[in-house]
């Protein structure tokens, strides 16, 4: 009889013939799990708290002002009450479109350079430099638009003859402000694309530009789209730049060289303690704020749909 016997397969934990291993939780894991659950529930509770705080004054507002007067192009109320909200929506839309027209190509282009072309040393100092733009206070951008961009660049160098406050300057500075958001998140999405896709494209004879535009960018399109929508949400909610550079007058003209008041600028410029609590002008602040909240919520919902539809997991 041979002194060597054939060894059977090793017994696995939890199966017959093997030791039963049970995961022993550390004492601090339950506390950490509880804190994480509490943080998630707190964020949901804050969202519902915002909605509850806005709904009651909005109900009182529409009890004082007809819904048609609110969703109109011209103010139908008294001299002290200007209930029309569509000019505010127009101003918000114009500033956001100008900002995205500037930020999307520059932000995505910067992300592609950092991800596909920049060396590790260049990326180490260039990416933090781009992200520094997000740390500049928005009020600084606003004063920069009023005292330099409009008089020196737009009216001086370009000779556009725009007004002192205008949507073009506001949109440009909002676009500059959201470039770091789009660039940073897009660069993370592009860097997450596996190297095998790049190597396969290059092996098929494509150059680096073709690989970047036709392989890497489509593969990361869900992350890039999420970055763009997040930048759009930031542009819609920006206050100080549009309040200083965009103007404080409701305007229905499509001319970007004129000033247009946005929803956030209206809230900032109207909520200055001059509206007694309970009046229609006071409650209108909450109506505009709720509309802004719904617009942002719709943008985020669209972002979730886009990400889930085109998301690719590697």
Image (cartoon, helix red, strand yellow):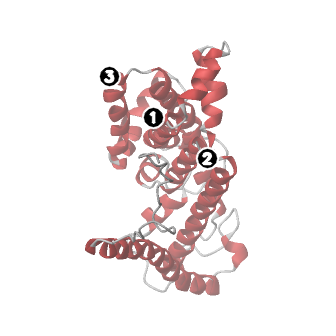
Is the residue marked by circle 3 packed among few (<14), some (14-19), or many (20+) residues within 10 Å?
few
- Disc 3 target residue: 121
Is residue 81 shown above or below 199? below
Residue plotted at (48% across, 42% down): 185
Q: Nearer the viewer, mark 1 or mark 2?
A: 2
Which residue does the numbered mark 2 point to in the structure image?
94
Q: Which secondary structure lies at badge 2?
A: helix
Measured as percent of width and height from the top left, residue 202 is found at 61, 17
Using the image as rendered, state which of residue 48 and residue 162 is in the foreground: 48
The quadrant in which the C terminus is found is top right
Nearer-the-camera pick, 223 or 96: 223
- Residue at 44% over, 71% down: 40
Q: Residue at x 56, y 36 (%)?
A: 104
Residue density around tag 2, few if under 14, some if 14–19, many if 20 or more, within 10 Å: many
- Residue furthest to the left: 27
- Residue that label 1 marks: 150
Coordinates of residue 241 in the picture (x, y in percent): 43, 48
Q: Earlier in the sequence, mark 3 or mark 1?
A: 3
User: Which of the two marks, 3 or 1, is nearer to us in this view?
Assistant: 3
Residue 124 visible in image: yes
Q: Compared to 118, does 36 lie above or below?
A: below
* Residue 273 shows in the view: no
């Amino acid at each position: 009889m041979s002194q060597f016997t054939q060894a059977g397969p090793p017994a696995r934990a939890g199966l017959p013939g093997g030791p039963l291993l049970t995961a022993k939780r550390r004492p601090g894991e339950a506390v950490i799990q509880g804190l994480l659950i509490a943080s998630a529930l707190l964020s949901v509770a804050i969202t519902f708290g915002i909605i509850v705080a806005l709904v009651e004054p909005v109900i009182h507002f529409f009890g004082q002002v007809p819904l048609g007067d609110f969703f109109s192009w011209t103010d139908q109320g008294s001299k002290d009450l200007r209930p029309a909200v569509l000019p505010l929506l127009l101003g918000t839309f114009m500033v956001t479109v100008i900002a995205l027209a500037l930020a999307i190509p520059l932000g995505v282009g910067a992300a592609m350079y950092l991800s596909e072309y920049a060396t590790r040393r260049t990326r180490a100092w260039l990416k933090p430099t781009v992200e520094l733009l997000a740390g500049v206070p928005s009020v600084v951008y606003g004063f920069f638009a009023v005292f330099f961009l409009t008089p020196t660049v737009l009216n001086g160098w370009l000779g556009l003859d725009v007004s002192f406050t205008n949507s073009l300057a506001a949109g440009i500075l909002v676009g500059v402000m959201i470039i770091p958001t789009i660039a940073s998140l897009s660069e993370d999405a592009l860097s997450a694309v596996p190297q095998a896709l790049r190597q396969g494209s290059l092996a098929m004879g494509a150059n680096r530009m073709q690989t970047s535009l036709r392989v890497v960018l489509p593969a990361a399109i869900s992350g890039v789209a999420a970055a763009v929508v997040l930048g759009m949400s930031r542009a819609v909610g920006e206050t100080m730049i549009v309040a200083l550079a965009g103007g404080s007058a409701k305007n229905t003209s499509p001319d970007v060289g004129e000033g247009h008041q946005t929803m956030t600028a209206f809230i900032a410029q109207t909520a200055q303690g001059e509206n007694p609590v309970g009046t229609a002008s006071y409650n209108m602040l909450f109506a505009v704020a709720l509309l802004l909240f719904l617009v942002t919520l719709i943008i985020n919902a669209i972002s979730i749909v886009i990400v889930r539809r085109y998301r690719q997991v590697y």
